[in-house]
Image: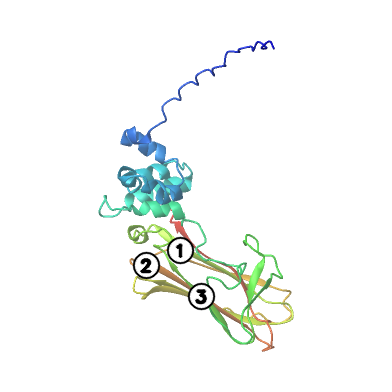
Amino acid sequence: MGASASRCRAARVPAPEPEPEGALDLSQMPPELLLVVLSHVPPRTLLGRCRQVCRGWRDLVDSQALWLLILARDHSTTGRALLQLARSCQSPSRNARPCPLGRFCARRPIGRNLIRNPCGQEGLRKWMVQHGGDGWVVEENRTTVRGAPSQTCFVTSFSWCRKKQVLDLEEEGLWPELLDSGRIEICVSDWWGARHDSGCMYRLLVQLLDANQTVLDKFSAVPDPIPRWNNNVCLHVTHVFSNIKMGVRFVSFEHWGQDTEFWAGHYGARLTNSSVTVQVRPP
């Protein structure tokens, strides 16, 4: 038998891939340039991840320079006021670690409602409650409250129902030198109303407390009861603490409600959209 001739084909050799360009090594950057790069990273990422990369990065994240650079990027009127305030209210030790401005930038406490679950959208979570009569329930609003995060409200019963939150201002991102600067104000707001077929009563007590929970200032409201047949009226209570005493570290926000007919069920005051905000005082 004649052997069939086999054809030999030259194996294809793949073209060599171009060598990748050297990866950017941020650790080789001068600290001044790395500081600018890090200033574009979200504050929560800086605190939660970047700070753990190495000692050098931790020192940069803990420095005041990084956070002042972040604040300086906001050119709005409020942003410029915050930057000026942050520069003038720094800690006595400029090398304090970690810098309190980090939590301030991450938590953004200025202008944010510090009350959790203000409309009952999460049931009674975050509130310390005392049930009177048939206790608290959450229902849909009978009157629209503009600007509220949810059109729901806390409804009271035939005996006083009470609920309360105590806000830790330092935990929210405000530091002692800022709180004691005389440059901020604390604004309080609450909405309360009635259902058309039942009258109701309402009380509000807001206290500014020091680190030992001693009362330094307070505001209370005991408005006249809403009568029956009221067209589902909804009323607004506000107050501004503008001359804040030194040492304020907590805000206690507490309110009560009940009906005036003493009916079983939930015919009492309807409370919603409670708020406590910290603002920069105008110059």
Q: CA distance from mark 1 to mark 3?
A: 17 Å
Considering only vertical position in the picture, is 136 above or below 125? below
Nearest the eye: 95 or 235: 95
Quadrant location of the N terminus in the rendered image: top right
Query: Which dot marks residue 164?
Result: 3
Q: Give, as a three-letter code, the residue at label 1.
A: Ile
Q: CA distance from mark 3 to mark 2?
A: 18 Å
Residue 16 appears left or right of 138: left
Q: Position of residue 213 (x, y in %)?
A: 37, 75
Circles 1 and 3, Cβ within 8 Å, touching? The answer is: no
Q: Position of residue 97 (x, y in %)?
A: 30, 53
Residue 242 appears left or right of 192: left
SS at mark 1? strand
Q: Closer to the camera: disc 3 or disc 2? A: 3
Circles 2 and 1, Cβ within 8 Å, touching? The answer is: yes
Q: Residue at x 42, y 30 (%)?
A: 23
Q: Residue furthest front?
A: 1
Query: Which dot marks residue 248?
Result: 2
Q: Residue at x 67, y 76 (%)?
A: 194
Q: CA distance from mark 2 to mark 1?
A: 11 Å
Whether residue 71 is visible to the viewer of this picture, yes or no, is: yes
Nearest the eye: 232 or 108: 108
SS at mark 2? loop
